[in-house]
Amino acid sequence: MQITATMALTTGLILGLLMLYFAFVSWREEEPRAMKLAVALAFLLPIPYLAASLIDFQLQTPFSLVLLVATLLAIIILLLPIGKGFAFEEDTPTKRIDERDIMFSRMQLVHGSDRFRDYYRRHPEKRALDDRFRSRPGLMQPGALYYDTITSAAAEASFKTVSAFHAMLDVQNLSASPQQKDPAQITQFLKQWAKKLGAVSVGITELQDYHLYSVIGRGQRYGEAVELDHSYAIALTVEMDKVLLDRAPYGPTAMESAQQYLNSGAIAVQIAEFIRQLGYASRAHIDGSYRLVCPLVARDAGLGEIGRMGLLMTPELGPRLRLAVVTTELPLIPDKRQQDGATLDFCRRCKKCADVCPSGAISFDDREAIDGVKRWQINSEACFTYWCTVGTDCGRCMSVCPYAHPDNLLHNMVRAGVKQSSLFRELALKLDDAFYGRQPATLDIPDWIGDVIA
């Protein structure tokens, strides 16, 4: 009797402490709803265990045993490797994407110009859709719903700094002869150095034809065929700050988005120049001047999977990141793609990003065959029109994603369970809705930004 009572008491105290830890973490993360619920559960969950250990009644021992066994069985069942994977179907693209078709290219078309006339002559079905976003104030423009001079100027400052790198991207100042380096050693050096420079994750893949755009859609070389005779691609991620992302779709999120485009771009440009110093051709692919589709490269480099919102989902940060890529002829050791069926299954079940999307651009349906490839695809015209209406690049989908919680012990324990079991995935989704809300409210703008805006 004494042993079962002690075990029940210990279990109750452990549950209470775990909930208090959860409350502390939620307080640190500015999640008041989760904090209050965790505090309440810290007192409520231990009650049956404390009653079984401290109150003397006729069925105390059997009650304690049943409670302990039920608790143990629940933990075991949730962690059993049941339904670990998503049924993978062919998701390798069979053709290249024309960069001129993406929204960031179409937004740069000037009415009445040769490019404008040529594009809509080839794609008349897109004219009415694009006229909708052109009728709105525009990104970081006066008159937009959430426009303010401070966050818009801060975002523009980052984007203009990124554009200053563009002149360096295609310059190949190589030494007389390539310096021979051991591929394994230089691969390890590049990964460690990229992380020292600020990258969260780094992966390498052999460059494939389907990674590349077919035609350049931005800049002075608009309309030229993409020709990139490189063998390897280095993909890297940088973290977007959760505190500012939780202010989506207001200005602070646009500030953070632009800042991380800059940070990822700076790392990529530095790595590309380093490789050229060794005598090998290289090119950084950064915001505004890509020759390839970064999420596809990053997926094949083993950094994550492409989720419901069309963004790369990594184990550490979910979609809360920005990407850059360096392509090169420097011999490297490629990583293998890590097909993560658990993440895709989680996305299939969750649909939280679709629920909160202000423009309704994210599908609730399962992946469908598009150009012979199974994937999710957002309504990019609806998404971009909303951006041009509010004046920011929104970010609501990223901010509410359960995978986007901070990279710490608490959330990593949940991620480990999600990866292990479909039952755990279902429970995690229910608990995420309970603690954080199915449609979490946007947090107030931090004082250090709000004071100057006001």
Image: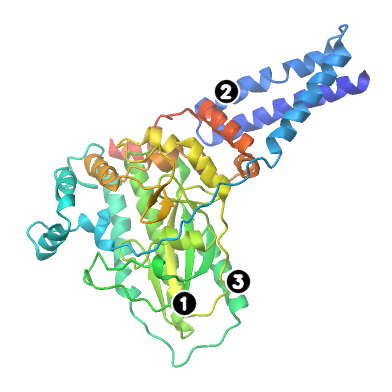
Question: Where 184 falls versus 151 (above or below)?
Answer: below
Q: Residue furthest left?
A: 112
Give SS at disc 2. Answer: helix
Marks 2 and 3, how far apart at CA: 44 Å
Question: Where 400 falls versus 344 (above or below)?
Answer: above
Q: Residues within 10 Å of mark 3 (few under 14, many from 20)?
A: few
Q: Is residue 318 left or right of residue 358?
A: right
Closer-to-camera residue (330/26): 330
| Badge count | 3
Amino acid type, label 1: Ser
Residue that carries the numbered disc 3 in the rendered image? 188
Residue that carries the numbered disc 2 in the rendered image? 37
Residue at the spot 55% in from the left edge and 71% down from the top edge: 190
**Quadrant of the rendering where the C terminus is positioned:** top left
Mark before the other along the chain sequence, 1 or 2: 2
**Residue 146 coordinates in the image, percent (x, y):** 26, 38
Image quadrant in which you'd find residue 94: bottom left
Judged by depth in the image, the label closer to the viewer, 1 or 3, is 1
Residue at the spot 52% in from the left edge and 36% down from the top edge: 29
Give SS at disc 3. Answer: helix
Marks 1 and 3, how far apart at CA: 18 Å
Q: Residue furthest top?
A: 58
Q: Is residue 7 left or right of residue 360?
A: right
**Residue 429 coordinates in the image, percent (x, y):** 54, 33
Q: Which mark is residue 231?
A: 1
**Residue 125 coordinates in the image, percent (x, y):** 17, 50
Q: Is residue 56 left or right of residue 125?
A: right
Marks 1 and 2, how far apart at CA: 52 Å
**Residue 413 coordinates in the image, percent (x, y):** 65, 41
Does the rendering let one see residue 364? yes
Q: Residue furthest bottom?
A: 176
